[in-house]
Image (cartoon, rainbow, N blue to C red):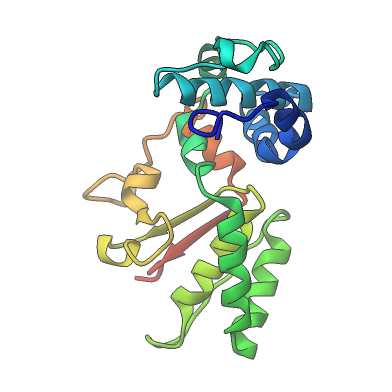
Amino acid sequence: MLQHCNPTEPGLLWTRFEDHICDDLLHQLQWHNPASTQADALNYGLYLIDKLLRTQGSSLADDKFNGEFPPFRTNWDLLLAEHQNHFIAEQMEYDHFELAEEAEGMKDQMNDEQQAAFNTIIQHANHGGLFWLQGPGGIGKTFVYKAVCAELQAQGKIVLCVASSGIAALLLSGGRTAHSTFKIPIPCHDSSTCTISKNSLLADMLCQASLIIWDEATA
């Protein structure tokens, strides 16, 4: 709109809709720095708008905007890089609104057993627990995995979906093999250990995960 429609009062548009435009940015910033505030989110929002305009040869500093936009930091990329964990950032890239709609639609299609499994896992996601979802192929286990994943990711939580084989991993939301995710050596012996340093970015992401879904976990 700013680039192609030339609104007469762009600053008023920003003031009226700034909270809606930046409604997810505070959550993103707090993953990098828990001390981030709503004012930071609005400032970051202006930076992102300006960054997008610059890709099209414009900026919020252009005369056509009449200086109506508040000043903002121009070094957000550097600030975020100081707190950046690319593993966590990757988990935050999902569209939370789209995931919420997806989860609601899937819940409406569940049978009683699927709903019971879904509710139990969701209730324990933040408190710890271990659950086995067993049954023959074709009863909808993967469907439940996807619904649980969408529900928690829509809330901004980290869910890791892994499987023992690459083919099974492809059926999960953002799925990867357990070997690549947890650095499990191949071949794996009784004395083998995962090569994850406790102070690494990957370890930090694993500690912050609310749920790990592991398909084909049985031998």
The count of marks equals 0
44, 90: nearer the viewer: 44
Identified at 50% across, 42% down, the residue is 93
Q: Residue at x 62, y 30 (%)?
A: 7
From the viewer's side, name the closer residue of 171 and 49: 49
Q: Is residue 217 left or right of residue 213?
A: left
**Residue plotted at (62% across, 77% down):** 107
Residue 27 picture location, percent across and down: 68, 36
- Which residue of the protein is positioned furthest toward the left in this rendering? 187
Q: Nearer the viewer, residue 178 or 47?
A: 47
Give the image quarter of residue 173: bottom left
Residue 195 percent coordinates (x, y)? 36, 35
Q: Quadrant of the C terminus?
A: bottom left
When the figure is inspected, residue 150 is found, relative to residue 51, above or below; the finding is below
Q: Is residue 61 visible?
A: no
On the picture, is 14 further left or further right than 113?
right
